[in-house]
Image (cartoon, helix red, strand yellow):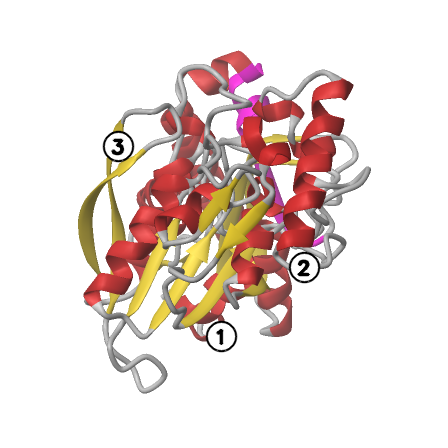
Amino acid sequence: MTRVVFAPDSFKGTIAAADAARLLADAWLTVDPDAETVLRPMADGGEGTVAAFAAAVPGAERMPITVDGPAGHPVDTSWLLLPSTAEAPDGTAVIDLASTSGIELLDELRPWDADSRGFGQAIAAALDHGVSRLVLGIGSSASTDGGTGMLRALGARFLSADGSEVAPGARSLGDIASVDLGGLRSAPEVRVLTDVTNPLTGPRGAAAVFGPQKGLVDIADQRRTDAGLARLADLLALDPQTPGAGAAGGVGAALLAWRGVLLPGAAEVAHLIGLADAIADADVVVTGEGAYDGQSGDGKVPSFVASVAAEADVDALLVAGRIDDDADTGLFAEVRSLTELAGSGAAALANPQRWLHEAGRQLAGARRGS
């Protein structure tokens, strides 16, 4: 009997990691019905982090909550409560920024007014529950607010020169004259998952690198925001060049100020869901993501899963929405591109479930024929 581990990331904007794992497993079983399939959907801190833990950890419980979303209206979402362990006797809360303050929650970009308040509200709800540990995924942010919205929800105050609260979002970063952390809630153990090592400010900082995708298109706007982030770092007594401080529009920096520890997202998720143990007993592992490109070898889920498989002397197979010409696919025994299978990117996006199923079926066939 073949034991197959399915550990894809989400196919961003189309298929969640947990759904991708199920689709691939079902496709594999149409070719190899006697196979033992093990689902370990992955994430790196971005979209799908909560779902990945929910699918992989027995006894995980979703905790519904309504937060203030980045578009300025309520968002119904949830955080995840993991069972008690020796390390976290009162349980662990898994919260992802994507489902509380993420860019996918916007119908249109709000570069100046979107903020991270909803993420902080979800964290506060987990603290109210009394958890021992927080695992926070901070990918897919909608804002460049330096994490001020999140810290506000946890009790911090950001004041102008006249002592009044400044407006939320990136718009008023430059107006912050002082920060009052007297009411900031105490932090338990805080593990922050990110695949970003960018600093808070400068040419590789949050405003310059990630600002454009959030609507900060003009260089002048990026510079204005960068200056505001630098001022915020000074007030929080943070080195703005700390690796990872620029993650999620500066939420990384805010979490550092709240004693959080920034960790490589894929590696930490893998540790917490027992990926290495699952792969150790496997014959083959299937991973994937939406776009496998020249950056995918730098700590992204597929390359990380392939490295774990290599350590266990297990073949890794890759499925991706598209595979760019500059991508290094040498880590994988077989690869399949949904774009190539469908004939075009548009066709693949029109029916990703169909082509993901076809990719899984073909990989199973290639494996049986090897």
Indicate the quadrant where residue 294 lies.
top right
Q: Does residue 337 belong to the magenta stretch?
A: yes
Crowd rating for badge 1 (residues with CA inside 10 Å; few <14, some 14–19, many 20+): some
Who comes first in sequence, dot 1 or dot 3? 3
Residue position for label 2? 238
Q: Are marks 1 and 2 in contact (CB under 8 Å)?
A: no
Residue lying furthest right: 203
Amino acid beneath label 2? Leu
The picture places residue 296, in percent across and down from the top left corner, at 67, 44
Q: Is residue 107 left or right of residue 211?
A: left
Q: Amino acid at mark 3?
A: Val
* Quadrant of the rendered image containing residue 282: bottom left
In the drawing, what numbered circle is on residue 280? 1
User: In the image, what residue occupies the spot 32% across and 87% down?
Assistant: 86
Which residue lies at the image location 46% right of the left edge and 30% below the top edge? 167
Which residue has dot 3 on it?
75
Res 92 quadrant in image: bottom left
Whole-angstrom CA distance, mark 3 to mark 2, is 31 Å
User: Which range of residues does the magenta coloring cover?
Assistant: 331-345
Residue type highlighted by circle 1:
Ala
Secondary structure of the residue carrying tag 2 is: loop
